Amino acid sequence: MANKCGHCGKFISQTDGVKCSKCTSTYHRPCVNISPESRISPKLICKTCKIPRQSPVPADYCIEASVDSRVESHIEGLLAKEIKLLRTELKTLSEEMVSFRQEIAKLNTSMTQFNSRLDSVETRFTSLEQQTKEGHKSCNNNELVDIIARLKRDLNIKEQAALSNDLELTGIPEQKGESPGHLMTLVAKKLDVDLDDRDVVSVERAGMRRNRESSDSEPPRPRVIVVRLARRSVRDQLLRAARVRRGADTSGFNINGEPTRFYLNERLTYANKHLFHRARQEARRCNWRYVWTKKGVIFVKRDSMSSKQKICMDCDIEKVFGSL
């Protein structure tokens, strides 16, 4: 049976053709570029069999490829947004870093100025210390002493004002189990002053109890009874009555021993007590007749014809009695 050439489609005899060992198709020698004199290889393969065939792509693979491409495009979009946001944040951070550096620079400038001022203060302080040691500030020291003295005087005045309703009762013997409030009531009756319980804020002995050293020694000096009243008018009434009835004693107080005189005076601050004691000493030395206190202020008077002098500080004593 005659065959056709697989390339040109014309009939070919078996003796003139060559056969592909793979697809068994017959071809003219010129159609497959083989000369008539050439020997035919038993493993001849035609051009068609030499070209590899592409296998068909499955439908599932196409769908998956499409889905993967969409996912990749979506991821690329998200990455682009994230990169954009990251760039924005980096830009903001860069601006904040610039502002932070400016603030740091200002802080460094302020610290430098502060250090220079501190060095200046230390230099001035060292200079003042040196001048004080060398005695170049004697005038300023005197001013400082005057300021301290004035401050002490002002504090003493305020402290005395806080004691404006207080009295001191001295000369009453101290007994075990006594009632200072009852003693004050007896003193008021002795002075013919009606003292209501509501007028008395507190009554107590001031200071530590004094113990006798031995049985043969004299009894200790009784402690002062401090009385705080609710009204200043009551205090002034008691003081006036005590001046009128000088020499009143403890007779009728049911106290062991002989009656003793008691004294009712204004309560003074520690500084005013010291000042009052000095004023009395100087008055005795200079034969001044009158030394008294009124509303916490100390007054002295040479005699009934002379004018009174007020003493508020130690320097006032020197001014009043120093020339005598």
Image (cartoon, helix red, strand yellow):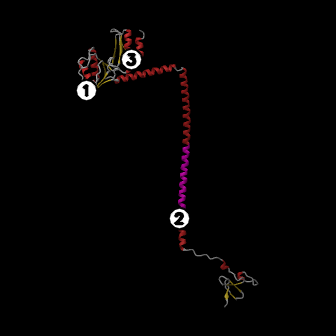
Picture quadrant where residue 40 is located: bottom right
Chain part drawn in magenta: 74-101
Q: Is 193 in the magenta? A: no
Q: Residue 275 carries which label?
A: 3
- What residue sits 48% from the left and 20% below the top? 143
- Which residue position holds label 1? 198
Question: Which of 132/35 is in front?
Answer: 132
Say how many tags the image has: 3
Where residue 52 sits in the image (x, y, percent)? 64, 76
Secondary structure beneath disc 3?
helix
Task: Tell me the distance, in whole angstroms, between the alpha carbons under discs 3 and 2.
Answer: 103 Å
Q: Which residue lies furthest to the right in this view?
A: 37
The rendered magenta stretch, by its main secondary structure, is classed as helix
Q: In this view, does 134 lie above or below 104?
A: above
Residue tagged by mark 2? 71
Indicate the amino acid at tag 1. Arg
For disc 2, the neighbor class at 10 Å (few under 14, some 14 to 19, many from 20) is few
Judged left or right of residue 42, residue 182 is left
Query: Looking at the image, do the residues carrying marks 3 and 1 touch, with CB atoms under 8 Å apart?
Result: no
* Side (left or right) of 83 relative to 8: left
- Residue at image position (53%, 72%) is 60
The three-letter amino acid code for the residue at tag 2 is Val
Residue at position x 54%, y 54% from top?
86
Q: How crowded is mark 1: few (under 14 residues within 10 Å), some or many (20 or more)?
A: few
